Amino acid sequence: MKKRHFWRRGISLGILTVVGLATLIAQTKWKGSVVKEGDVTIISNPKEPLFKGPLLELEEDLSLGGPEAQGDYAFGKVQTFIVDGSGSIYVLDRMNFNVKIFDPSGRHLRTFSRKGQGPGEFEYPYTLSLNQTSGELALHELGDGITYFNTDGTFLRHVSLKTALSLRAVVDEKGDIYLQEYIRKGDEAHDETKKLASDGSLIASIAEGPSWFVFKPDPFRATSYFLIDQANNLVFGQPLTYEIRFYGPADTKVFKKIMRDYDPVAVTAAEREREDQRRDPGGAPIKHEFSKYQSAFRRFFASDLGHLFVETWETTSDGKKIHDIFDAEGRFIGRMPLKPSGITILKGKYYALEEDEDGYQYVKRYAVTWRVK
């Protein structure tokens, strides 16, 4: 009988336990500001959050993957995963060129697709998203188009994105596509975030940001990031400054900006040395041009209550990344350490893709108890 190693109960993040309410509430008044510039609300936040103690507690109640997982429960290299409204989990495994589906209890339901160039096959899987309205899964290939499947794994269609190099693409609940495209103009390069119709035709070019794909490799270069939140807004992060913009789904115009004062994190000598040890596919050393500082943030994820968790480059002694937490109004309300990388908080559950010190990946789910909402 196959052993299942994905359930692990009763494990809490120690840093979040036994904290009294008096410790939690360190400030009685938020010290930021809200101003209106035309139709745009700008929320400016100070360096310090409203609350100093932990805002939520996490208790693990599901773990998939890891070194002891076997058969359908074992992963090669997870690129990402998503969760639907019922709690079912869809895992994109780029090493095995497939998608694995698990029900809310963690039971494997099915695996579909494989490597290839035929219908329903792919070679460079990169992004997975779900149109909650139609129930269609959208699998984006790096530099290529989007392949659509039913949630039972049935191939539906392929849509070409007609771009030079698509870095990332996701669909919203209307079936529209949000695309991050690499743009090169002479010796300059940047990423451009666009909105496309379901057939791949352009609706609007929305935002520009720095690109990781540059001529002189810099692993610490600031790169833009985006997601589609529960309200179907495009949330775009500008990492050169600490600025996060919200664009409405109808007119693709910015209606809110969240900003925060912060102290830049310097790139350390150890980090530069580690990167200098890397080699290109031919075995030659890579010539880097290092930034002096890390970007303002790395990435972020959202909760269904409207919170935004922004992953910074600040790292704890046990390898966790400090996350800035903003409430639905855009106020900087707290900070907490989390293992990379959070996916979402949905219906009282936190979902994350984590990796242990040996490189084994886990799809994790935690029960969430909010201390302050």
Image: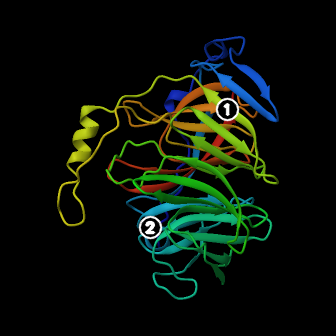
Q: From the viewer's side, name the closer residue of 32 and 373.
A: 32
Estimate how packed mark 1 is, as few (under 14), some (14 to 19) or many (20 or more) residues with alpha carbons within 10 Å: many
The amino acid type found where label 2 is placed reads: Ala
Task: Residue at the far bottom: name it.
Answer: 118
How far from the left and from the top, in percent, is residue 25?
A: 66, 15
How far from the left and from the top, in percent, is residue 30?
A: 71, 16
The amino acid type found where label 1 is placed reads: Ile
Can you tell which mark lies on residue 74? Answer: 2
Q: Which residue is drawn at 45% across and 73% down?
A: 71
Can you see residue 89? Answer: no
Residue under numbered circle 1: 258
- Residue 86, compared with residue 225, is above or below; it is below
Quadrant of the rendered image containing residue 300: top right
Task: Specify the quadrant that holds the C terminus.
Answer: top right
- The mark nearer the N terminus, 2 or 1, is 2
Q: How far apart are marks 2 and 1 (CA)?
A: 39 Å
How far from the left and from the top, in percent, is residue 247?
A: 73, 46
How far from the left and from the top, in percent, is residue 166?
A: 53, 65
Q: Residue at x 35, y 37 (%)?
A: 291
- Residue 357, compared with residue 196, is above or below; it is above
Q: From the viewer's side, name the closer residue of 101 and 241.
A: 241
